Amino acid sequence: MKNIIFIAPPAAGKGTQSELISNKYHIPHISTGDILRKVMKEDSEIGEYVLEVISSGNLVKDEIMYSLIEKRLGEKDCQEGYILDGFPRNVEQAKKYDEILDHLGQELGYVIALEIDEKLLAKRITGRRVCEDCGTIYNINEPSETPEIESTCDICGGKLYQRNDDNLESFKNRYQVYLEKTGPLKDYYEKKKVLYKVNGNQSIDEIFEDIVALLEEHK
């Protein structure tokens, strides 16, 4: 199995597909958020720095983030492949990622773009509900993803809530940023002949099947 990057707009199901692929192929699903949370728990100078920056609502310096990503991707569990979530987000980061892969002696692998209609994304965003206890995600606008009891988690009975940024105005802003930043990124990877497009308007299972099919075809 090769390394995988997902490119997708907000609420396209990137996290869900990452977990499904991770479980099927037994490769780690790595997010930049997970990397930072792990570092913050360390009793080290870098750990203290990241904790202070995140706690103040600021962003970690790019060079430090690049260093942390390279360190994580160099760990033993990544040798047979991994799914990288949340990076790169623009062409500048993509070029830096190329350098990181060169240092590690790894291949770029697959860049999978989930293509999905804007109206469907807006529907998913505004209908998304999250359990405050276990984090399970539901969607009241999707019959197959609604909880059995309104506002109550099927798994643990916790209360469901709507995130502050899961509204139409916030979605439009985030989607515009995605178009501006990711359009060039998709072009960048298409020129490298590693970009694979998947129809994201389908069900979770159908999207997963399409992703598995392309991974098997291009082994």
Image: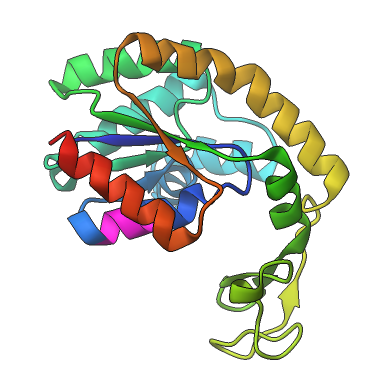
**Which secondary structure type mostly characterizes the magenta part of the structure?**
helix
> Would residue 81 be seen by someone viewing this image from the given angle?
no
Image-quadrant location for residue 190: top left
Residue found 22% across the figure and 41% down from its top: 215
Residue found 73% across the figure and 35% down from its top: 174
Q: What stretch is highlighted in magenta?
A: 19-23
Compared across the picture, whether 83 is left or right of 92 comes to left
Question: In the image, residue 77 lies at what x, y percent?
Answer: 16, 48
Identify whether 26 is placed above or below 187: below
Residue found 56% across the figure and 22% down from its top: 182
Q: Which residue lies furthest to the right in this view?
A: 169
- Along the viewing direction, whichever of 151 and 218 lies nearer the viewer: 218
Which quadrant is home to the N terminus? top left
Asked if residue 20 is among those painted magenta in the image, a careful observer would answer: yes
Identify whether 56 is placed above or below 165: above
Question: In the image, residue 217 lies at what x, y percent?
Answer: 17, 38
Which quadrant is home to the C terminus? top left
Identify whether 1 is placed above or below 106: below
